[in-house]
């Protein structure tokens, strides 16, 4: 089973700042099939990025994904008020599918 | 557009079973695996398994093996997840999702297990 470790657990930032979220896989993720989601209280996860890099339809270009080996990164270039939420990574290249434990981006 | 519409909230007693449905539209149902994910109150996302609607193959997370069944009915583009021997630890929102080249999620179904 591929274990995904997200860091930091909580990120305290101000609107307009840059956010860098990490998701480290315990082994290679097939096809770099890793997705990033945003979740707000009481809502279903919202897909941001699929296959490590590809922004989902309607997602602003301030969200971007990258990968280096087994290290995946979600970058939000300039935080907007609506970006404060919990973010999860998920690998779907191998079974069992796995999620990271989440990173909370909170207002400083 | 693609939609995954799940059945409504359920309240079950410990020891009972629950069956959640997920009706797909806007794409060829048999072309994408349907994954099930749950989220307990205040907790993270937990992957439960997948169903291949094309043939009915399944893969279950070890945590649920022996008490979970995923099935599909291609004639009505609907997937089902049944979980048996419920305990209070199974109280959660259950999501279906099509995951492949494209990814879409259902709205979630709250299952409450309480005596």
Image: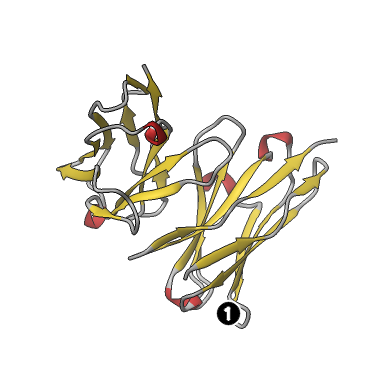
Looking at the picture, how far across and down is residue B51, in whole percent?
51, 65
Q: Is residue B113 above or below residue A32?
A: above
Q: Residue at x 43, y 76 (%)?
A: B31
Say whether residue A29 is visible: yes
Using the image as rendered, state which of residue B87 and residue B75 is in the foreground.
Answer: B75
Using the image as rendered, state which of residue B36 and residue B70 is in the foreground.
Answer: B36
Looking at the picture, how far across and down is residue A16, in whole percent?
26, 28
Residue A81 as seen in the image, left or right of residue A43: left
Judged from this view, the residue extending furthest toward the left is A68
Looking at the picture, how far across and down is residue A54, in whole percent?
25, 55
Q: Residue at x 20, y 41 (%)?
A: A70
Image quadrant occupied by the C terminus of chain B: top right
Say whether residue B59 is visible: no
Q: Is residue A82 above or below residue B51?
A: above
Which residue matches tag 1? B74
Crowd band around label 1 with a 10 angstrom C-alpha radius: few (<14), some (14–19), many (20+)? some
Q: Is residue A20 above or below residue B33?
A: above
**Callout 1: SS:** loop
Res A95 → quadrant: bottom left
**Chain on which label 1 sits:** B
Looking at the picture, how far across and down is residue A3, in whole percent?
35, 38
Q: Residue at x 36, y 54 (%)?
A: A92
Q: Residue at x 42, y 51 (%)?
A: A96
Q: Is residue B31 above or below residue A23?
A: below
């Amino acid at each position: 089973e591929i274990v995904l470790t997200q860091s930091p657990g909580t990120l305290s930032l101000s609107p307009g700042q840059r956010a860098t979220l990490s998701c480290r896989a315990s082994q290679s993720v097939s096809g770099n099939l890793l997705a990033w989601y945003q979740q707000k209280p009481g809502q279903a996860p919202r897909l941001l990025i699929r296959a490590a890099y590809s922004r989902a339809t309607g997602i602003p270009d301030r969200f971007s994904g990258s990968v280096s080996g087994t290290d995946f990164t979600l970058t939000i270039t300039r935080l907007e008020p609506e970006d404060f939420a919990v973010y999860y990574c998920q690998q779907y290249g191998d079974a069992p599918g796995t999620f990271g434990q989440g990173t909370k981006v909170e207002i400083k | 557009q693609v939609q995954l519409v799940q059945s409504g909230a359920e309240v079950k007693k410990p020891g009972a079973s629950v069956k959640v449905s997920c009706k797909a539209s806007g794409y060829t149902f048999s072309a994408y695996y349907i994954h099930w994910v749950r989220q307990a109150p205040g907790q993270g996302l937990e992957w439960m398994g997948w169903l291949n609607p094309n043939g009915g193959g399944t893969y279950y997370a070890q945590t649920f093996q022996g008490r979970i069944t995923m099935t599909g009915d291609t004639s009505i583009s609907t997937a089902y997840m049944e979980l048996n021997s419920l305990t209070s630890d199974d109280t959660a929102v259950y999501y279906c999702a099509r995951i492949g080249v494209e990814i879409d999620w259902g709205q979630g179904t709250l299952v409450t297990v309480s005596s």
